[in-house]
Image: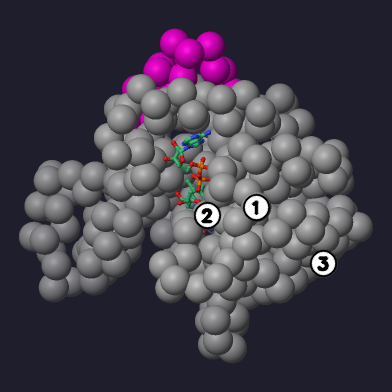
Amino acid sequence: MTKIVDLLTHGRTFSFEFFPPKSDDAARELEKAIAELEPLRPSFVSVTYGAGGSTRDRTRDIVINIQQNLGITSMAHLTCIAHTREQLSSLLEEYRAAGIENILALAGDPPTDGGDYPHELTYASELIELIREVGDFSIGVAAHPELHPRSNGDRAADRRYLAEKLAMADFGVTQFFFEAGHYLRMVEELADLGCTTPVLPGIMPVTNAGQIKRFAELAGAEFPGWLAERISAVADDPAEVRKIGVEVATDLCRELLDTGVPGLHFYTLNRSTATREIYANLGLAP
Ligand SMILES: Cc1cc2nc3c(=O)[nH]c(=O)nc-3n(C[C@H](O)[C@H](O)[C@H](O)COP(=O)(O)OP(=O)(O)OC[C@H]3O[C@@H](n4cnc5c(N)ncnc54)[C@H](O)[C@@H]3O)c2cc1C
């Protein structure tokens, strides 16, 4: 039984994020990635939750399976938009009964299909309150160094909401970014607001340029010109793209570790190679 908040008081955490697969082939890929990453002894792993509950059972089953059968501390992502309080409470009860102690509390994105959805909770901060009512969980929240995609560029309001949310939670995990300055500026701005809750930087190695550019657009993260130039120079050679992606992510991790970050959270996209290479470059592999 391990709470991430306790791990963070004892030192840095190194963690991996997965998403629930949609097909049998994808499930085998995830299984392979977990088997290959397990020897790196992550502090914890986390599994995303499809907005509106689209992956409810799959997320739950993977989180519980990893924790109970592999003995790796596992964190369930949970989004509150388009759920009733009762639906959320009953899922949290299931986690509690299964010994899951860590939840990443998220608002999630509002459904765009015009359907008739319950509208009981709107913000991640409301979900934190509900989680605390249900049980003694360690609670993480999302942080966006380059501002939340729904912030409309209002930096002061974005940082104020983020600081309030972090004050209610135990730790944060960031959206990915490619320049350490974005993360460091966010931490400084939070400190100015009196918020010192640890925030783990999220690392996304570029392994497929088109895909990551699309993700960056959705996440409100800048895909910097210098990186685009390096990648486009080798665009026809997937192995070279991956090599540059790993090199750039390694440099970013080194810079962040040098500034004293509380840990690193890797977006694995259910693959193991890039994360294993970065680990080896950083001398982190056991
Ligand atoms: C590490 C990480 C993991 C993620 N995992 C998932 C996942 O598993 N599934 C998924 O669907 N998405 C996930 N996301 C994406 C994230 O959930 C989306 O950005 C989502 O749109 C909003 O969730 P939030 O928790 O960031 O929202 P919130 O923190 O609730 O903020 C939403 C917006 O409302 C504003 N706001 C907050 N409080 C108030 C208030 N009181 N009044 C007015 N405005 C307010 C905020 O500034 C922000 O603009 C993840 C993001 C990160 C960084």
Instruction: Say which amino acid is labelled 2.
Output: Gly
Mark 1 and mark 3: Cα distance apart in space:
35 Å
Residue found at x 51% / y 68% = 270
Can you say whether 233 is above or below 263 in the image?
Answer: below
Circle 2 is placed at which residue position? Answer: 108
Circle 1 is placed at which residue position? Answer: 120
Between tags 1 and 2, which lies in front? 1
Few, some or many residues within 10 Å of mark 3 (<14, 14–19, 20+): few
Disc 2 Cβ-to-ligand 1 distance below 8 Å: yes
Helix, strand or loop at label 2? It is loop
Q: Quadrant of residue 81?
A: bottom right
Q: Quadrant of residue 256?
A: top left
Mark 2 and mark 3: Cα distance apart in space:
29 Å
Asked whether residue 180 appears in the rendered view, the answer is no
Query: Which tag, 1 or 3, sits closer to the chain's start?
Result: 3
Q: Which residues are magenta?
A: 182-197
Mark 1 and mark 2: Cα distance apart in space:
13 Å
Helix, strand or loop at label 3? It is helix
Circle 3 is placed at which residue position? Answer: 69
Asked whether residue 193 appears in the rendered view, the answer is yes
Instruction: In the rendered structure, find residue 210 and report the number of the disc placed on it.
Output: none
Q: Are marks 1 and 3 in contact (CB under 8 Å)?
A: no
Instruction: Give the image location of residue 195, x and y in percent.
Output: 54, 17
Residue found at x 56% / y 76% = 21
Query: Which tag, 2 or 3, sits closer to the chain's start?
Result: 3
Residue 276 left/right relative to 232: right
Instruction: Give the image location of residue 68, x and y in percent.
Output: 84, 63
Name the residue nearer the viewer: 174 or 55.
55
